[in-house]
């Protein structure tokens, strides 16, 4: 470790620890390089050192859509200990990306600011939802983003107007470490926000499985189709490999019934892709990020 990263990083160095504790489905092995920096300058130095040594940097937050396998020599950086900021100027919130979505929505409710209720119930951090251009119920986070602040590969802090960022379905063109985000929110009463949160959560509980942990939607919806319906119609609802199971309630949700392994999950993903392609002629593209 010291040959690559200076010993001054030992306060944030968690290398050798298992990524299982970060995983939303409790799957993960030990990481060669794992950091949880406490300051932006420390984060910048870790990124600089990683780039100098040709090591891939992977930011993690809530890990609600990351499947950890053998991460090799990737430099995994958790945002958990970075400083939290939340500054309000009218309808604009300037906020650090290590806020949990649920916490941030509740915090904005105190200021009569809403709009992001469609993300209620997602166990993610803001940074991940921006990176993935998260969306649900015909709404998308990119509609609310004014700017992002990132640490680039040269360890420089940059503010990027979001109209300069290319947004696609579950993807944006910026792949740097997203530190803070500016969100233009809607003026709404706390009662309106609470009511909408209740409506969204009721819909999620009606449509999605919550009895076992998952990574949310496993596959992106192909144009004109719903991945879950394709998987279900191929007869795979309830299919189980080891302790990984395709949900019978929503077939785009793959569950960990208790002791599922990375291999179980990957085998189930491969099976779904194979059957949908053979039976429907459609290639399913992963929405979850697989690190292996």
Image (spheres, rainbow, N blue to C red):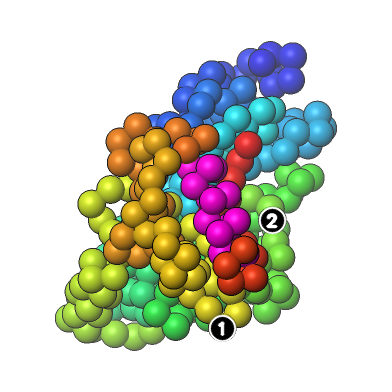
Which of the two residues, 81 or 218, is positioned nearer the viewer here?
218
Residue 134, position as x, y percentages in the image = 50, 68
Dominant secondary structure (helix, strand or loop) of the stretch shown in magenta: helix
Callout 2 environment at 10 Å: few (<14), some (14 to 19), or many (20+)? Answer: some
Q: Which dot marks residue 175?
A: 2
Residue lying at 62% horizontally and 32% vertically, measured from the top left: 71
| 39 relative to 172 in the view: left or right | left
User: Does the magenta segment cover residue 113?
Assistant: no
Q: CA distance from mark 1 to mark 2?
A: 28 Å
Mark closest to the chain's N terminus, 1 or 2: 2
Residue lying at 47% horizontally and 25% vertically, measured from the top left: 18
Instruction: Give the image quarter of residue 1.
Output: top right
Q: Which residues are magenta?
A: 265-277
Tell me the residue that label 1 is attached to: 224
Q: Nearer the viewer, mark 1 or mark 2?
A: 1
Which of the two residues, 77 or 7, is positioned nearer the viewer here?
77
């Amino acid at each position: 470790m010291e040959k690559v990263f200076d010993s001054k990083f030992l306060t944030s160095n968690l290398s050798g620890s298992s990524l299982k504790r970060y995983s939303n489905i409790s799957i993960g092995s030990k990481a060669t390089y794992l950091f949880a920096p406490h300051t932006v300058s420390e984060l910048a130095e870790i990124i600089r050192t990683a780039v100098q040594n040709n090591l891939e940097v992977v930011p993690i937050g809530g890990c609600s859509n990351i499947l950890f396998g053998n991460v090799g020599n990737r430099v995994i950086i958790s945002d958990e200990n970075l400083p939290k900021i939340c500054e309000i100027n009218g309808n604009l919130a300037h906020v650090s990306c290590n806020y949990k979505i649920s916490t941030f929505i509740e915090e904005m409710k105190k200021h009569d600011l809403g709009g992001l209720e469609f993300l209620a119930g997602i166990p993610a951090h803001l940074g991940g939802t921006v990176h993935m251009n998260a969306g649900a119920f015909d709404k998308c986070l990119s509609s609310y983003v004014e700017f992002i602040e990132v640490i680039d590969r040269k360890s420089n802090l940059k503010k990027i107007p979001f109209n300069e960022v290319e947004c696609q379905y579950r993807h944006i063109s910026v792949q740097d470490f997203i530190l803070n985000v500016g969100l233009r929110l809607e003026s709404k009463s706390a009662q309106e926000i609470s009511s909408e949160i209740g409506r969204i959560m009721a819909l999620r509980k009606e449509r999605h499985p919550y009895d076992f942990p998952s990574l949310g939607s496993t596959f992106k919806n192909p144009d004109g189709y719903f991945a879950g319906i394709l998987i279900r119609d191929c007869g795979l609802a309830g299919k189980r490999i080891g302790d990984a199971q395709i949900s019978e309630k929503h077939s785009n949700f793959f569950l960990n019934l208790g002791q599922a392994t990375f291999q179980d999950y990957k085998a189930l993903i491969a099976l779904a892709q194979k059957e949908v392609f053979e039976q429907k002629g459609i290639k399913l593209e992963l929405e979850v990020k697989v690190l292996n």
